[in-house]
Image: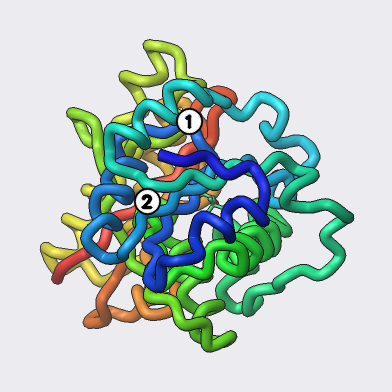
């Protein structure tokens, strides 16, 4: 696996390839990321990953400085997963001057849920993903369904800018008990980690309520929020949305349940597509 630290070196290495399959990450890789790499491999003529902790998508009070950086083990994991080329620029290499040109996603999608609780988050995500796309020029790009709204925002951006990139959504990898793998799980104490499975259980309960015919979505959401609050969580949202655009759902439409909640100092997100 070659490691490119600059855009120039990346472009040199990509020269002969016509069909890069790309996995953008912020590092601290877990098995969910490696699923993305493994699923990318048969889709391109070269498999490219990036590691870049993108300051633009962190709010001032968030964990940019403490975000886990695990360079050596990330490289080992990527090599073992069959990644051919790792793009790992530092901030000066990716943003040599302040990134004044930014990509603002459709507010109808980008300002709700995560975008509401983390204002500017999707501007930061879209801006860096557009820049990474411009550097790598992938034909296929892999994103985890764990960040469901992010996947939808990126798909919409790719469609609106007519980028010649197929965006592939990859299923969430879960630990035993159902906890979705996430780099931020590393912030949890042992006791919190044991409790964290309750987030996916609350989503399962929401899905089960829909599947068994309950049609008062607002009551289902209120119950999910209360069940977590009783256990000491601080939920930002537990909501049933239309899968197509994450707007308010009506019975009969394909649905997704989305959750964001704080457990102690750690904010976790998760979601579940509901088959009715
Ligand atoms: O999902 C992530 O890890 C990040 O948001 C991404 C897509 C790599 C952009 O920084």
Q: Position of residue 91 (x, y in %)?
A: 75, 43
Image vertical order of residue 61 relative to residue 148, above or below? above
Task: In the rendered structure, find residue 47 and report the number of the disc placed on it.
Answer: none
- The image quarter containing residue 144 is bottom left
Identity of the residue drawn at 51% across and 79% down = 158
What residue sits 73% from the left and 44% below the top? 55
Frontmost of labels 1 and 2 is 1
The residue tagged with tag 1: helix, strand or loop? loop
Residue 146 is labelled as 2
Instruction: Give 87 or 14, whichever is nearer the viewer.
Output: 14
| Location of residue 5 (image quadrant) | top right
Neighbour tally class for label 1: few under 14, some 14-19, many 20 plus, Cα within 10 Å? many
Q: Is 13 situated left or right of 61 in this image?
A: left
Relative to 232, does residue 39 appear above or below in the rendering?
below
Q: Is residue 31 above or below residue 248?
A: above
Residue on which disc 1 sits: 28
Secondary structure at numbered mark 2: helix
Residue 136 visible within the image: yes
Q: Counting other residues with Cα less than 10 Å from the Cα at mark 2, is it few (<14), some (14-19), or many (20 or more)? A: many
The residue depicted at 35 percent of the width and 38 percent of the height is: 199
Q: Give the mark nearest the N terminus, 1 or 2.
A: 1
Could you tell me if the residues under marks 1 and 2 are in contact, i.e. CB atoms within 8 Å? no
Q: Quadrant of the C terminus?
A: bottom left
Q: Count all numbered tags in the image, as a single digit.
A: 2
Q: Residue at x 69, y 34 (%)?
A: 64
Residue 182 vs 46, above or below: the answer is above
Question: Taking the image as drawn, is residue 239 in sight?
Answer: no
Residue 260 in the image, given as x and y percentages of width and height: 48, 46
Residue at the extreme left of the image, as rendered: 212
How is the model colour-coded?
rainbow
Q: CA distance from mark 1 to mark 2?
A: 15 Å
Assign the N terminus to one quadrant of the image: top left
């Amino acid at each position: 696996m070659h490691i490119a630290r600059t855009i120039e070196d990346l472009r040199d290495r990509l020269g002969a390839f016509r069909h890069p399959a790309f996995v953008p990450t912020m590092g601290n890789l877990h098995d969910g990321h490696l699923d993305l790499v493994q699923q990318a491999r048969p889709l391109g003529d070269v498999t490219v990953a990036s590691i870049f902790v993108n300051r633009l998508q962190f709010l001032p009070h968030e964990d940019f400085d403490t975000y886990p950086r695990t360079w050596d083990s990330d490289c080992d994991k990527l090599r073992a997963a069959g990644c051919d080329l790792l793009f790992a620029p530092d901030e000066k290499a990716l943003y040599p001057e302040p990134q004044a040109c930014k990509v603002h996603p459709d507010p109808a999608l980008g300002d709700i849920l995560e975008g509401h609780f983390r204002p500017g988050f999707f501007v930061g995500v879209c801006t860096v993903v557009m820049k990474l796309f411009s550097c790598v020029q992938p034909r296929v790009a892999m994103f985890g369904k764990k960040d469901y709204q992010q996947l939808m925002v990126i798909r919409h951006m790719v469609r609106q800018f007519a980028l010649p990139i197929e965006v592939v959504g990859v299923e969430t990898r879960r630990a035993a008990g159902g906890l979705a793998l996430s780099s931020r799980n590393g912030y949890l104490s042992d006791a919190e980690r044991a409790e964290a499975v309750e987030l996916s259980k609350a989503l399962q309960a929401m899905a089960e309520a829909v599947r068994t015919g309950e049609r008062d979505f607002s009551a289902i959401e209120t119950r999910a929020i209360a069940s977590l609050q009783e256990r000491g969580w601080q939920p930002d949202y537990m909501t049933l949305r239309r899968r197509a655009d994450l707007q308010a759902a009506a019975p009969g439409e394909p649905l997704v349940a989305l959750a964001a909640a704080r457990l102690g100092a750690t904010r976790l997100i998760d979601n579940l597509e509901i088959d009715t």
